[in-house]
Image (cartoon, rainbow, N blue to C red):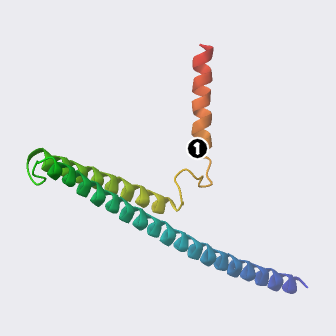
Amino acid sequence: MAQIATVASLALAGASMQDQARKRKVEARARDAQQQYIASQQAAQQRARQDVLARSIAATRARFGASGVSPDEGSASALVAGMRADAAQADSESADLLRQRLAAGRASLLNSNGDFQGFVRATQSFGAIARNLLD
């Protein structure tokens, strides 16, 4: 009878391991799909920013041209270069944020990742504030 219990417990352990492996695969697929969705959103946002930049540069150059200032020289050129530099900085920051989101495995860094570190930090901060108020 003891042998049957041992075999049954081994069978249950094997089934449990298979179930866990299946769950991990499903979670990995969901995580991959979410990361692809986030990356496609990022690409769409970058295209939209590039379109806005191109329109802004065109409008700025047209205004300078209409006022008789060469849009390729002097302050007009510096203004366009500044607009491009600002856009490049925004793209870089956006790409950094995307890498952080994907590394954290979260759709948004504002969403909780299931650990209690944020709660612990908030509790410590609250405790420090309370001590300061009581002193």
- Compared to residue 76, the image places residue 1 above or below, namely below
The residue at which mark 1 appears reads as 118
Side of 2 relative to 107 (left or right): right
Residue at image position (36%, 65%) is: 47
Q: Residue at x 62, y 35 (%)?
A: 123
Q: Position of residue 127 (x, y in %)?
A: 62, 27
Measuring from the top left, give residue 62's x and y in whole percent: 20, 54
Residue at figure coordinates x 54%, y 60% from the top left: 107
Against 6, is 31 above or below?
above
The count of marks equals: 1
SS under mark 1: helix
- Find residue 96 and report its horizontal and vertical position in percent: 37, 56
Residue beneath the point at 47% across and 63% down: 102
Q: Quadrant of the N terminus?
A: bottom right
**Badge 1 amino acid:** Gly
**Residue, far top:** 135
Q: Position of residue 36 (x, y in %)?
A: 48, 72
Q: Residues within 10 Å of mark 1 (few under 14, many from 20)?
A: few
